[in-house]
């Protein structure tokens, strides 16, 4: 268990490092290119695709670009961007969604936000859920941190958190004699999050674990981004 947790943590840290090592070219229309800028001329910008630094050099006209955000955080904004928003990425992405399975275990309503004024990067979620019927009830409170890798509207979500869970009927296997436990949770999910606002979707692998063991689990969610 300890070795698995260490591997996952290192993967998360490595993913965060890669995200900050990119130069991002923001195009008019909302597309964001993850690159390594190699040269900036009077009318054009030359770059390599970050995921293929040994590949060819590409060229884009400056008039198609709103700005470049370099890996060190410096930003270069180009004139002539018109009325197109150069700061769409600077609006904090927030989501409300209902989740089936996943870190909420069964069914939850959730709020998710980025911690910075960005559409990706580090953020967190908190939820409240449960289910009842046939004399058995389940109450859950999932809380977690997550990190979004990607740009535009397609992201890969990595998350780590904990979920308080209370079952009205004793379950020696998962919940123990008291019917209450705290699960550790992870998330490896695809997230569709619109550039500005609109319908959002999440789905993927969400393992859970406690003192009774490690269990593969899955989930999906539907919601709204604003």
Image (cartoon, rainbow, N blue to C red):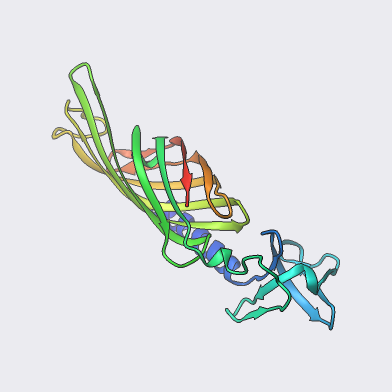
Nearer to me, 65 or 133: 65
In the rendered image of this protein, does residue 220 appear above or below residue 54?
Answer: above
Q: Position of residue 152 (x, y in %)?
A: 63, 56
Q: Position of residue 225 (x, y in %)?
A: 48, 49
The residue lying at 39 percent from left, 56 percent from top is 124
Please identify the residue farthest to the front as the structure is shown: 83
Left of 192 or right of it: where is 2? left
The residue drawn where x is 53% and y is 60% is 120
**Residue 154's spot in the image, x, y percent?**
61, 50
Tally of marks:
0
Q: Is residue 89 left or right of residue 57?
A: left
Q: Quadrant of residue 50?
A: bottom right
Q: Foreground: 112 or 194?
A: 194
Of 130 and 28, the residue lying toward us: 28
In the displayed structure, 40 sits above or below 151; it is below
Q: Residue at x 48, y 57 (%)?
A: 93
Q: Residue at x 60, y 57 (%)?
A: 150
Residue 119 drawn above or below residue 76: above
Residue 222 appears left or right of 22: left
Res 1 visible: no
Note whether residue 33 is visible: yes
Q: Residue furthest top?
A: 134
């Amino acid at each position: 268990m300890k070795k698995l947790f260490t591997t996952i943590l290192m993967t998360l840290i490595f993913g965060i490092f890669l995200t900050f090592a990119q130069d991002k070219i923001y195009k008019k229309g909302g597309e964001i290119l993850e690159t390594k800028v190699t040269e900036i001329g009077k009318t054009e910008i030359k770059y390599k695709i970050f995921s293929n630094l040994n590949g060819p050099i590409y060229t884009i006209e400056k008039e198609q670009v709103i700005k470049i955000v370099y890996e060190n955080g410096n930003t270069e904004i180009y004139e002539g961007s018109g009325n197109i928003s150069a700061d769409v990425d600077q609006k904090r992405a927030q989501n409300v969604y209902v989740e089936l399975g996943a870190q909420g275990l069964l069914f939850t309503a959730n709020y998710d936000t980025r911690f910075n004024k960005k559409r990706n990067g580090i953020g967190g979620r908190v939820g409240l859920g449960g289910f009842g019927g046939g004399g058995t009830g389940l109450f859950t409170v999932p809380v977690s941190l997550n990190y979004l890798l990607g740009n535009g509207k397609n992201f890969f979500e990595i998350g780590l958190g904990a979920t308080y869970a209370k079952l009205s009927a004793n379950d020696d296997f998962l919940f123990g004699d008291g019917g209450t436990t705290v699960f550790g949770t992870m998330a490896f999910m695809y997230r569709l999050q619109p550039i500005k606002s609109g319908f959002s979707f999440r789905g993927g692998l969400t393992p859970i674990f406690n003192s009774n063991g490690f269990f593969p689990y899955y989930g999906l969610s539907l919601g709204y981004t604003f």
